[in-house]
Each structure stands twice: as structure tokens, then as C-alpha cells.
Image (spheres, rainbow, N blue to C red):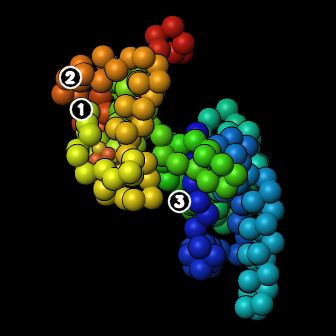
Amino acid sequence: MITAEQKTMEEIVECVKPFRRILLAGCNECVTVCAAGGRKEVGILASALRMVFMKAGTPIEIDEVTLERQCDPEYVNELAPLVESVDAVLSMACGCGVQEVAARFSGKPVLPAVNTKFMGASERQGVWAERCQGCGECVLGRTGGVCPIARCSKQILNGPCGGSTNGKCEVNREIDCAWQLIWDRLKALGMLDRYEENIPAKDWRTARGSGPRRIFREDLAS
Ligand code: SF4
Ligand code: SF4
């Protein structure tokens, strides 16, 4: 999933300050799972903002809505009747959702209430960690299901770098060395021969090397 964290209250207040009526829009997908911008967070942030502006003597009107998905025009269209009557939209979706809403309502300021972080997974309650950088040419089949691009600090395709200690990365002792994890996993699978195979240099054009990417499915495109 895409992970995100709410911006600081000071930052949000600062960007909302010029407006007297806003629409606070959450998303039911990834940001709900990582507790950054779902229905619950929309309710909490709306109350907190009302309180802040009330105390400052400049009350603000906040309408609340949470869409099924903010990165999908089908759902973003549902905002149309609500957007008309507000000065700006404050979106709690990831950067994809914020941009989709901004593209649909070009005459309204659309502001982000969260910082979008990375594609990751839940390690335990309240902890998410980066797992994929969307490189466009997945090598997990060669690395025992552990991504050397997202999880090795140096993105080494044929590791390790030699700097790890006790299984921890030399760049950040808080994280496991990805190549230690790869070795452990391949060993457990009885596939250490894979570890000996050289992974060829990557064609980064499938990543961001050729600019923004698109997926075109002829069978689905209208
Ligand atoms: S190899 Fe590429 S696509 Fe596969 S998990 Fe890593 S970054 Fe993601
Ligand atoms: S210690 Fe491991 S994870 Fe860290 S940079 Fe070296 S190979 Fe990559």
C-alpha cells in the first residue's frame, strides 16, 4: 500500500488560513489502513481545526467527506456538488488522490494534509516499512522475495556491500541488511545457487529513468 503521515497541525493551519470554508476529503483505501487520512482521521482533524480557528477568533466552516478512492475519477466526481460551495479542498489522500482532485476541479485550490511516504507493508501495529520502489522490472524471483532496491540502502543488485554487522545495515543500524535477509531466505529455501548468480545491470528506463510512466492496457482502454 501507499503510506502517508499527517502533516503537522501548524503546517495545515498555515495553508488553510486564507480560506473561510473548506472541504476536508479523506480516502477509504491506503491512507485509511495506515491511519493517516481515512474517515476517522477526517473527523479528528476537522474538530481540531475548528477548535484552532475558533480560539483564534476566526471560525472556519469545514465540510467532511471520505471517498472510496481519491485516485479514481469515478469517485472524485462525487465531490462535485460539495466543492461548489467551498473555498478550497484539503485532501487527506496520498499525492495521487490530491492530484486527481486538483485535475478535476481546476478552479479550486486543493491542498495536501498528509505527506506521502512510500510503498510499504505493516511490520507490526503502528509500524510500516518501505518494501517496493516500483522499479517496473521486479527481481524478487531472484532474491528470495526480498527487494534489494527498496530495502538495501545502496540499492545493490549483487550484494552485500560488506559493511553489515550482526545482520544490520551499515548505513542505518536500525534496519536489517537486505542482503543478509536475501541470503537467509535463499538458504532456508535451499536455493543458495540463486545467490551465486549475477543479476545483470538494471535498465532503469522501466523505473523513473524515462520520466513519468503509464500503463496502457489495450484490452481495457476506452
Ligand atoms: S524489484 Fe522493483 S518491483 Fe520488485 S519489489 Fe523491488 S522495487 Fe518493487
Ligand atoms: S549493509 Fe546491507 S542493506 Fe546496507 S547497504 Fe550494505 S548490502 Fe545494502
- Quadrant that contains the C terminus: top right
Q: Residue at x 44, y 53 (%)?
A: 175
**Residue type, mark 2 in image:** Asn
The reply to whether residue 91 is in sight is yes
The mark that comes first in sequence, 1 or 3, is 3
Kindly identify which numbered label has been placed on residue 32.
Answer: none
- In the image, residue 221 sits, relative to residue 60, either above or below, namely above
**Image spot of residue 7 (x, y percent):** 58, 67
Question: Please, what secondary structure does the residue beneath circle 3 have?
Answer: strand
Question: With respect to residue 99, does 52 lie above or below?
Answer: below
Three-letter code, disc 3 = Asn
Q: Quadrant of residue 58?
A: bottom right
The residue singled out by tag 2 in the image is: 198
The amino acid type of the residue labelled 1 equals Asn
Q: Residue at x 73, y 43 (%)?
A: 28
Instruction: Specify the quadrant that holds the N terminus.
Output: top right
Front in this rendered view, residue 222 or 200: 200
| Mark 2 Cβ and ligand 2 under 8 Å apart | no
Image position of 95 (left or right of 134): right
Q: Residue furthest top?
A: 219
Q: Give percent across and percent down for residue 25.
A: 71, 54
| Disc nearest the viewer among 1 and 3 | 1
Q: Which residue is labeled 3 in the image?
A: 115
Q: Would you say residue 150 is visible in this rendering?
A: no
Dot 1 corresponds to which residue? 158
Indicate if the residue with disc 3 has its beta carbon within 8 Å of ligand 1: no
Distance between the Cα atoms at labels 2 and 3?
37 Å
Front-most of 68 and 138? 138
Q: Residues within 10 Å of mark 1 (few under 14, many from 20)?
A: some
Q: Quadrant of residue 191?
A: top left
